[in-house]
Amino acid sequence: MTLVKTFNGRRSFLKATALAGGGMMIGFSWLPSCQSDSNADLTLPKEWFDLNGFLKIGDNGLITIMSPNPEGGQNVKTSMPMIVAEELDVDWEKVVVEQAPLDTKLYTRQFIGGSQAIRQGWHGLRMAGATARHMLKQAAAQAWQVPETEITTAEGVLLHEKSGRSAGYGEMAAAAARIPVPKEVPLKDTKEFKLVGTSRKNVDGKKIVTGQALFGMDYHRPGMLIAMIVHPPAFGMKLKSFDDQSARKMPGIRDIFTIKALQDEYERQYFDTCTFTDLVAVVGETTWEVLNAKKALVVEWELFTAYTESKLTPGGKQTVRFPAGLENSSEHILQMEKEAAKPGKVRRKDGEPEAVFKLPARVIERTYTAPFLAHNCMEPMNFFAHVTADKAELAGPLQKPEYTEKTLSARLGLPLEKIDIQMTRLGGGYGRRSYAHWLVEAALISQKMNAPVKLIYTREDDMTSGIYRPAYHAHYRAALDAENNLIAFQVKAGGIPESPLYADRFPAGAVDHYLAEDWAIESNITVGSFRAPRSNFMAVAEQSFLDEVAEAAGKDPIEFRLELLKKAKNHPVGKNNDYDPDRYAGVLELLKEKSNWEEEIPGIYRGVSAYFCHNSYVAQVLDLVMEQGKPKVAKVTCVVDCGIVVNPDAARNLTEGAIVDGIGNAMYGSMTFRQGEPEMNNFDKYRLIRMEEAPGAIDVHFVKSDIDPTGLGEPAFPPVFGALANALYKATGKRHYHQPFIGNGLAG
Amino acid sequence: MAIFNLNVNGKKTQVDLDPATPVLWVLRDHLNLVGTKYGCGIAQCGACTIHLDGVATRSCLLPVAAVGNKAITTIEGLSENGDHPVQKAWLEHDVPQCGYCQAGQIMTAVAFLKNNPHPSDEEIETAMNGNLCRCGTYLRIRAAVKTASKS
């Protein structure tokens, strides 16, 4: 049992009764479907008692647990409430889950990204449950006039064994709500966990399979209008003028006008990337009518001149320059080659790598590239807005409501408390919905129309509006001595417009002479976080390269990595190595066993990869078979160390998905440009992985751990690119240096 | 504008609109049946799959004028209480992640299993290959179709 201080003085843990009358439970039930359906059969209580911002208990023992973070498919809406329920000690079958609205006074870090929801939420969620349980116990102790320490709980029941008295939580909820919030609460020993670590079904499962309104696209209000935007067809262009003479007269069309998403003088926050600030908005009664009017618009575009944007980033104020011109992917390759040939910015240096590379040694030198990628969430970008003179109501899918609320407040000139953001389920996020310019656009359109509006991006709008994964390039060198020891390692990585380098990652720390450099090339193509940013390229480059170095050294690729990790543990080189060699080696050791690595099976071509990112360790073996001359992924064996696993089957699902997604992006993912214009604008041109190309089987194993949970949305995604590249080499005898593997790399 | 008498999920309904309007938007904007999803608008992703007289059809490119007397079934009309064997199999395997594509996946699977109740693994893959899932739930979809085929 651990005693922990209750949370930071946040209101969510302050005296519960202060909240009860405050209406915090009112207003977020904008759709009944926001409630989980798992317990739809339970009778609703006559009265609810708010114990804190995370939960309320009904007089009949029914529990409502708020899920604070947006749900985009990572299962947080099930897993986060499970953590509360564990410490509260209730029967999961009597829990109803509700999506909390954005409320920065009640909750911390209400966003998804960086695989951090469970990791960062862990402590607060446990405390929310533990605090309420403690208050219930105190209420029972007072009612029964017995010491609180003699009261135990189990599955929503309070028990005093000596006297044989017991009561359901519902019976004590009213009294508990009047108990002062304790300054300290005991948390369970993780070994006592009964719910966390067991598989529980998605709380929205039934709503999803019956097609109920869950997504932003599904949001509806009486009198709501439909809006769409028209943005420039190419990066490097801006709006000049438009002619809406015929479009305006079309049936159902209410208005056509321009909006400016962000003001020029506005100092942008980190997630305020907005590719095309000036847009034409088309507003009408139905989607079909608006689509038709959009096509009938005649818009003139012009080239823009170079401009800069100042942005507040976690690392301080940053100025980003957007050069003029219409860019081409073919030129991007040449630009990157040219830049990579120059000395880069040194980000880390151990020993004397330059000198060692001049010694007589075997040097292996390779270059890897990857193209821009579009996120392609299955639900295109959209948002509902109803802005009036004194308030703004918004609903839809987004990843960073806390940030977006501030952006909108600045743009509309409305104080934060006049802005209400409801979070719908996200039809995928993968980083794209962190950049919520479309929310601002929806609000501006609603303001102009003085009506509730739902802004919908078409698939083409979605795919061609930027905020892509950057294009990358990495050059590696390794030197082996006469005994095949890795004595020097060099990485120089760069990208358009950002570098992907992580200078302190493996094999930094395991090589005496190490150099990491990087560079970046300006571009007017906008970029943003994409599932496991930077790692999603560095993993394939590094893990493919290590495979080749191991081969040159005549060593088994797993043993080669384990040797290096042993050195990183026993004789670490340099400072700030950002991984734990034991946990890294741990996933590889378990992978050897689970994949039967040492067993050779004729016709099966195997590639291995291991990577550490977002605080978790993942190692994978990918098995390829050749079918009619084409490689097919038969199986992926995956070992994950992400600390305690809250909901194992959901965690397996997420890991399987990351693997499928990774194979798809490695094989087919590519966004290219000609004269600034994205060459892919829909799924007929942008290839996503389909069922036939998915692995025959995925076998996921979690390292048993009592370490607090780390991340899972991203870590299994990057390494599979490398495992695939290495298996393709075994199957075809050809190394794959350029993504997508199916094409010719950047040029598509 | 023209009047169309539609049979949607067993109910007769009348709409007055542009004959070129795709059934997807008739369902979503006019009939408030939002389970059928917009994904691409060019019949490439399968999120908008409905049944037309039991046949899986992409509603995003199907003009309402082309429906005629055919019965439309959407995900909302597949079963009374979400207890169609395919829906049950989806829940058993806890298939969805984000969930956006799943209604289309289920509609494709139901129509397929009706014609081929005991498919091979290859037949399942071929039948389901037209439905995209960016979350990558394909293995669970495969398993759920298999389970449903046994029930």
Image (cartoon, coloured by chain):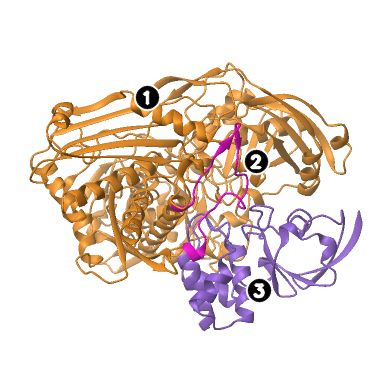
Question: Whole-percent x and y of residue A368?
Answer: 36, 41
Q: Is residue A19 visible?
A: yes
Residue under label 3: B80
Q: Residues within 10 Å of mark 1 (few under 14, many from 20)?
A: few
Specify whether A394 is left or right of A333. Answer: right
Near-viewer residue (B109 or A547): A547
Say which mark, if any, is on residue A697. none
Q: Colour of chain B?
A: purple
Q: What residue is shown at x 26% (from left), y 71% (from top)?
A: A601
Residues flagged by tags 1 and 3 on a common chain: no
Cα separation between marks 3 and 2: 37 Å
Above or below B112: residue A18: above
Residue type, label 1: Gly
The amino acid type of the residue labelled 2 equals Asp
Q: In this picture, which residue range is highlighted in magenta? A: A667-693
Give the label, 3 or 2, closer to the camera.
2
Q: Residues within 10 Å of mark 3 (few under 14, many from 20)?
A: few
Judging by the rendered image, the residue that carries numbered circle 2 is: A461
Secondary structure, mark 2, is helix
Tags 3 and 2 in contact by the CB under 8 Å rule?
Answer: no
Chain of the residue where label 3 is placed in the rendered structure? B
Disc on the earlier residue, 1 or 2: 1
Residue drawn at x 62%, y 44% as measured from the top left? A681
Residue indicated by mark 1: A315
Q: Can you tell which chain is drawn orange?
A: A
